[in-house]
Amino acid sequence: MNVYVITSGEYSDYHICAVAQSRKKAEALKKLFDKENYTGASIEVYDTNTYQTGRSLYVAEYDVKRGELKITRVKESDEYPDIPSERTMKGIVGNGLYLRTGINARNKSQAEKIFYDRLAKYKAEQSGLT
C-alpha cells in the first residue's frame, strides 16, 4: 500500500503539509497547499510494505556482565513482537541484564556500529553526562 506525503518548502523550511491514502486526495491537497505557499507543494510516494530500500531490521542484544554483543537479522517470517523501539535501550531479558534494541541498517557491521554508538550515548545518559 502506498501513502502520499504532501511536502513544501526548501532546506530549513522543508516540512510535511499532509498525508493521504489515495493519489486523488493527495492531488487535491497539493493544489490546496500550492495556493497557500509560494514555494509550491510536492507529492512524495512511500510504499508502506517496505522498510527502507537496501536496509534490514536487526535485533542487537548486549550481555552487560560478559560484554558480549549478539546481532540477529530479522527475517520477514520471524516474529519479534517485543523488539524495543530504536529509542529504547534498557530491558531485562532472561536471567541476566541485557541491553536490547531494534536497528535499521544496511548490514550486520553497520548495525554493530550503530549499536555501539547508542551504547555510548546510553552510558553517558546513565552517568548524567548528557
Image: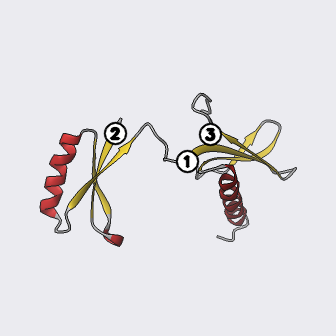
Label 1 or label 3, whichever lies nearer to me, is 1
Compute the Cα span from label 2 to label 1.
Answer: 19 Å
- Give the left or right position of residue 112, taking residue 105 as reference: right
* Residue pointed to by mark 1: 55
Name the residue carrying label 2: 2
Instruction: In this rendered view, identify the residue nearer to me: 70 or 99.
Output: 70
Q: Give residue 91's position: percent from left, percent from top.
A: 70, 45
Q: Amino acid at mark 2?
A: Asn
Q: Amino acid at mark 1?
A: Arg
Residue picked out by circle 3: 83
Residue pictured at 20% horizontal, 68% vertical: 39
Q: How is the image coloured?
A: secondary structure
Say left or right for 35 vs 56.
left
Report x, y in % for residue 118: 66, 59
| Residue at 69% from the left image edge and 71% from the top image edge | 129
Q: Secondary structure at mark 2?
A: strand
Residue at 59% across, 28% down: 77
Q: Residue at x 37, y 45 (%)?
A: 46
Q: Is residue 4 left or right of residue 33?
A: right
Residue 68 picture location, percent across and down = 83, 50
Instruction: Identify the amino acid type marked 3.
Output: Ile
User: What whole-number distance in Å separates the C-alpha atoms at marks 3 and 2?
Assistant: 25 Å
The kind of secondary structure element at disc 1 is: loop
Confirm or deny contact between disc 1 and disc 3 (CB under 8 A).
no
Q: CA distance from mark 1 to mark 3?
A: 17 Å
Q: Give the camera-side residue of 76 and 88.
A: 76
Task: For marks 3 and 2, give the one nearer the viewer.
Answer: 2
Residue 13 in the image, given as x and y percentages of width and height:
31, 69
In depth, the one of 19 and 126 nearer the eye is: 19
- Left or right, 36 with respect to 113, comes to left
